[in-house]
Amino acid sequence: MVASAVHGIRRRTRRLHVTAAGCAVAALCTAPASPALTDRGAGGAKPTIVLVHGAFADGSSWNRVIERLERRGYTVMAPANPLRGLYSDSTYIASVLKSIKGPIVLAGHSYGGAVISTAAAGNPQVKSLVYISALMPDVGESGMSLSARFPSALGTATTSVPYQADGVSGTDLYLKRDKVHPVFAACLPASEANLLAVTQRPAATTAFSEKAKVAAWKNIPSWALVGRQDMTINPDQERFEAKRAHSHTVEINTCHVSLIARPDAVADLILQATTATATTAAADPRTR
């Protein structure tokens, strides 16, 4: 009888262990995803966020956005956009992207939008594109052809300066000092706009004249921010581009330098693209 009792106890113990294990598995299957993981891509890796600046600016224009993204635990890069021409600039940025391991969320401001549209083409690591008051040319379009359809105050706000470098000559475009505040940065204090004028980086005319050969937004999900008070790129152009690309679009009251004036709104849109991309990747059986 003692042996029978012990045998019975062992059977009950085994049943308890199996039941407990089954409950644990069920709990794991039904529990909601941890908030800490919702912004991670396939394999649990957070994407690297790459920010590409536009003409008349440099990577520091993203500083306030970078602070907000890094506080959320993201690795952020803001490489220098050479501003020498769409073809060479996008080739350079594409080489930067190839050096990054894991998924990428790629954002571009102003002319930087044209650059990311080319640089991201054919790179499966780029999971989403974010356009901040940006150019989004289709194949065969250029910044100049788009601005001809949607004129803005930028047309009379620049001055041309010839340059020569390593036997190559061309023409740089600068913003006129007295136009930086009203046209480029009206939503900033005059003193801050003056600093942008003093430190601006010129863009070669080829940055705006070269026609896009690819348009990555046709194959990669995109998000777009429209600045209603933008005097550099016509807000109607930004709306047209975003609608054509089927971008997830937000409009806010801001001038062209929304990334400086409204960094919270810009960072929020990038984070939306990041979390939506991670959710899509997790649901896609091809990523498993």
Image (spheres, rainbow, N blue to C red):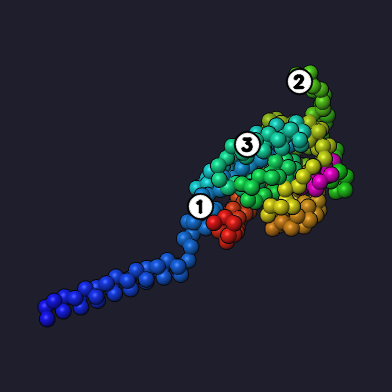
161 relative position to 190: left or right:
right
Badge 2 is on which residue? 165
Image coords of residue 26 (percent x, y):
41, 70
- Marked residue nearer the N-terminal end (3 or 2): 3
Is residue 10 visible to the viewer in this orientation of the structure? yes
Q: Secondary structure at mark 3?
A: helix
Front-most of residues 245 and 190: 245
Image quadrant containing the C terminus: bottom right
Furthest residue in direction top, as rendered: 167
Q: Which residue is mark 3?
A: 96
Q: Is residue 144 left or right of residue 261?
A: right
Q: Which disc number belongs to residue 43?
A: 1
- The residue at the point 57 percent across, 55 percent down is 287
Quadrant (top left, top right, bottom left, bottom right) of the N terminus: bottom left
Alpha carbon distance from label 3 to label 1: 22 Å
First to last magenta residue range: 134-144
Residue 233: horizontal and vertical position, in percent?
79, 46
Q: Amino acid at mark 1?
A: Gly
Q: Which of the two discs, 1 and 2, sits closer to the camera?
A: 1
